Image (cartoon, grey):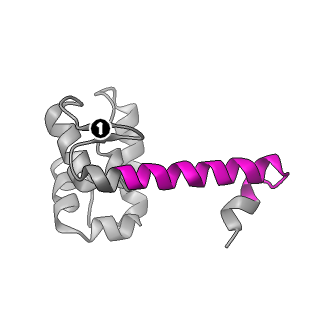
């Protein structure tokens, strides 16, 4: 997923402008992100790109400093409201399914490796 992110022009530009080594593979970029957590300059909001949040929402959050969003759910929405609502519902269903599997005795590893 991160390799795909690093191959897209707009996310690459955002990450490059923040000093990420976009031409050095996903491991170096994740390492750079971890260093950003430690550098004492605040929370690295570009983490939304790494988590798969919609690009418009990440850009909107950074530009608006977390204000002026149209919906606040699992993340703050600045782009496609309908798409975000659908994703929030999908994630809710997935979370409920995983919790039920854990209650029934499956391990986290079994959940991760399940088809």
Residue 110, quarter of picture:
bottom right
Q: Is residue 100 magenta?
A: yes
Q: Residue at 73%, 53% (x, y): give it.
A: 108
Query: In the picture provided, is 69 more to the left or to the right than 32?
Result: left
Q: Residue at 34%, 47% (x, y): give it.
A: 48
Residue range (magenta): 85-109
Q: Position of residue 40 (x, y in %)?
A: 33, 26
Query: In the picture provided, is 41 more to the left or to the right than 109?
Result: left
Q: Position of residue 73 (x, y in %)?
A: 39, 38
Residue 113, quarter of picture:
bottom right
**With respect to residue 74, does 39 lie above or below?**
above
Q: Which residue is mark 1?
A: 71
Q: Position of residue 67 (x, y in %)?
A: 20, 28
Instruction: Give the camera-side residue of 75 and 11.
Output: 75
Q: How many marks?
A: 1
Query: In the picture provided, is 83 more to the left or to the right than 114?
Result: left
Image quarter hosting the N terminus: bottom left
**Residue most extreme to the right:** 105
Q: Position of residue 95 (x, y in %)?
A: 60, 49
**With respect to residue 46, does 114 lie above or below?**
below
Instruction: Give the camera-side residue of 87 and 51.
Output: 87
Image quarter hosting the C terminus: bottom right
Q: Is residue 11 magenta?
A: no
Q: Is the magenta region chiefly helix, strand or loop? A: helix
């Amino acid at each position: 997923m991160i390799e795909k992110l690093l191959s897209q022009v707009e996310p690459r530009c955002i990450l490059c402008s923040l000093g990420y080594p976009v031409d050095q593979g996903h491991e170096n970029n994740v390492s750079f992100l971890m260093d950003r957590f430690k550098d004492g300059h605040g929370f690295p909001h570009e983490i939304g790109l790494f988590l798969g949040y919609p690009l418009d929402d990440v850009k909107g959050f950074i530009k608006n400093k977390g204000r002026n969003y149209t919906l606040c759910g699992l993340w703050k929405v600045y782009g496609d409201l309908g798409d975000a609502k659908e994703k929030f519902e999908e994630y809710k269903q997935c979370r409920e399914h995983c919790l039920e599997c854990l209650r029934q005795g499956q391990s986290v590893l079994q959940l991760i490796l399940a088809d």
